[in-house]
Amino acid sequence: MKSWWQVLGIPRKSDRAAIRRAYARKLRVTHPEDDPQGFMVLREAYEAALRWVEYDVDWEEPDEDEAEPVLAREAVEAPPSAEPAVALYVAPAEPDPLAEVRAAEQEELRRRTAALDAGLRGPWHGDAAALKSQLAAILAAPALIEIAVRDSVEHWLADLLADTIPRSDHILRPAIDAFGWEEEGNHPPGVWRILARIDEWRVIEALRRGDHALSAGWNALTRATAPGWQRRIGALRPGIAAQVRQLFDLADYQAPGIAHSFDPGAAAWWRAHLEAPRFGFVDLLVMLLAAGLALGLAFGAQTLAVRAGGAAAALLAGLAFPVVRLRIVAPWRERREMADEPPGWLADAWPAPWLLAALLLVAVPIQPLVASVAVALAAVAALWMAVAAGREPAIGNPIYKILSFAVLAVFGGAAFFALSDAEKLALGAFAAASGLIAMSGSAGLAGALWRITARPVLAALIVTLLLVGGAVIRFQFPDAPEPLVPWAAATVAGMVLLAAVSDVADGSPAVPLLPWVRWALWAALVFAAILSAPQGERADVVPADPMKQLEQREPGFAALKTGNPGLHSAVALLRQQQADRTKTAAEAGREIDRLVNTAYRERLPRAPAALLAAEMDIRLATLREYRALDVAACASGEGERKPPPISEKLRERHYRHALQVAGSWPASAADLARGRDIPADELLRAAANGDAAKAGRLGAAMGGSDVKAKCDARIAFLEALVAQDDADIAKTMRPALIARAGPDSAKR
């Protein structure tokens, strides 16, 4: 049998404090439930050590091998007696020498626990320093040496600290360290609430530092002095309402202790705000986009009808959106969620009209009808998304977004406003719908791809490549639009698709390529905007050789040196006057245009046959644009009606042709005699594919009052003409060209 100092693992001459520390260390690894025999040995050793310290006496039982010989010798040597021998060994009951000490220690412990209870439960709560001092006094109490007392105090303290959170926050860590609550073992039930509070501390610290995903919502819930109007403005920030809702859910179901950090006024305001659908960021964004579109149409549209009607429609749509969302869409979605209806195909099919709008912009020439269809498809897709799959908008990194759009505005603003009204309307509506989908419908877009295929990342990449390939092919067509139209539709749609699946891991080999493809799409969009920007020069920049700069920008002026030296000298003089600032850029430009137009009208009748054929082809393209913009202008003759502005691309083509004519050498007599004059009846029959009745109707329409029929007949007539040989075209049209060459026909 081991001696008490061997059991406690200390020297025999240790004092009371050393004995208590040794006993406390052994208690942490010796539990009565797990090792009752070892616990009894430890307890007996501890009591023996205290008796030795108190009385300097070892009350140890002798070892069995030593006791047996003594008892045997006494039995042999003992004299016979009438009394039973066992009576000689009955010892009188002795009083506990530590009873009074233990009673005093327990009384002192009760006093200390009562002080801590009063400090935590009130009515007067103690400060952090007082609470720490009271807990330290309890942990240092001598009565805790008793295992039963220590167990009782541990259970009481755990319940007290758990019940008084958050007032007990200051002393949770010392209590955990003192009783080893973070270690494995059987702990009081209140300990688990205390450890959960420690986890809540970590969450709160992350929220306060600002590196948590819900930090912005946390600031909104903990700001005590914010007035109501400031909270209403803060609620418009993207994602704030969703973050606050997540924090409420976290406090209600997972981490209730974080609710102690909420400001009561802020929490009450936000709970009332979230009870019903409210005007939010998406509504504000749509209204701002609608206002911007209305301003763009009002000041940048080419016709009065588009300016007035388009601006009014945009404003009406922007004002109606929040009303429809709050009064119709939100209640419908709430009823659907309450009914727990699984989403069907109708909830996932909204990307179809959006992709169809992108395909129209990529593959089809943007005429007013096509633009109207594209706008309608984009609007349907955006509203369908908002109803079926829209979520709280997620902006991501706002600085990155602002810089990205600033770069795009710098490089693409001029290109966008140089587009025709139809192109601007269609592309603007598609871009706005794509922005809403990227912010609110990414999850729904990814879900729609999941419904179609098990490889949504690969599917998104394939669709993107098909759209980009279509833009490349479309750019090769003779009537290709400005690069900004098809390329913007393809790249914007691709970026939205790839952003929706950026967090999806479907095991396809396309996953690692997504970041690179998205950057490539962004670069292609900026490059297309640069290519589509109208060529021009700044009025405040003086070139070293102004005429040489003009010749580099427009090679037709260089050809004037040999074809029309007088015109070249006059233009060079005007450019020098602009460089000398004796004329403004606008004045010099108008004068140069007048000189080019005059030379163009003078030389057109005797120009070579190839240039006359090109003239007719340009007139045909002009009538086609007139038909799309103003059918009455298409049907009227030169000077009868103010024509609508044509596209920038056609204006550039017309101006270059005028320069070629102005610098051309007159056709020789042999060239003038070549070809045949084609009668109008023959051209009408050719336009009617040999159908005499249809040819008669075309002839009647050209002389009639139906502007649409007259426009169609003129276009058909020119189509039949430009299909002829260049010499025949020149021979047929040369006599009438002088009268039809109006002063503004070549105006840039």
Image (tube, grey):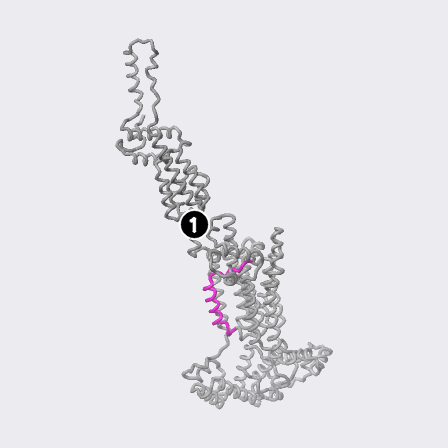
Measuring 55% from the left and 70% from the top, which residue is drawn there?
A: 485
Measuring 52% from the left and 84% from the top, which residue is drawn there?
A: 659
Residue 19 percent across, percent down from the top left: 31, 34
Residue 433 percent across, percent down from the top left: 56, 65
**Image: 338 above or below 641:** above
Q: Quadrant of the C terminus?
A: bottom right
Mark 1 belongs to which amino acid? Answer: Trp
Report the front residue among 123 and 99.
Answer: 123
- Element class at badge 1: helix
What secondary structure do most residues of the magenta stretch adopt?
helix
Report the front residue among 591 and 168.
Answer: 168
Answer left or right for 603 relative to 714. left
Quarter-of-image position of residue 390: bottom right
Any magenta on residue 398?
A: yes
Residue sticking out furthest to the front: 123
**Image: 743 above or below 268:** below
**Label 1, on which residue?**
201
Answer left or right for 263 relative to 640. left
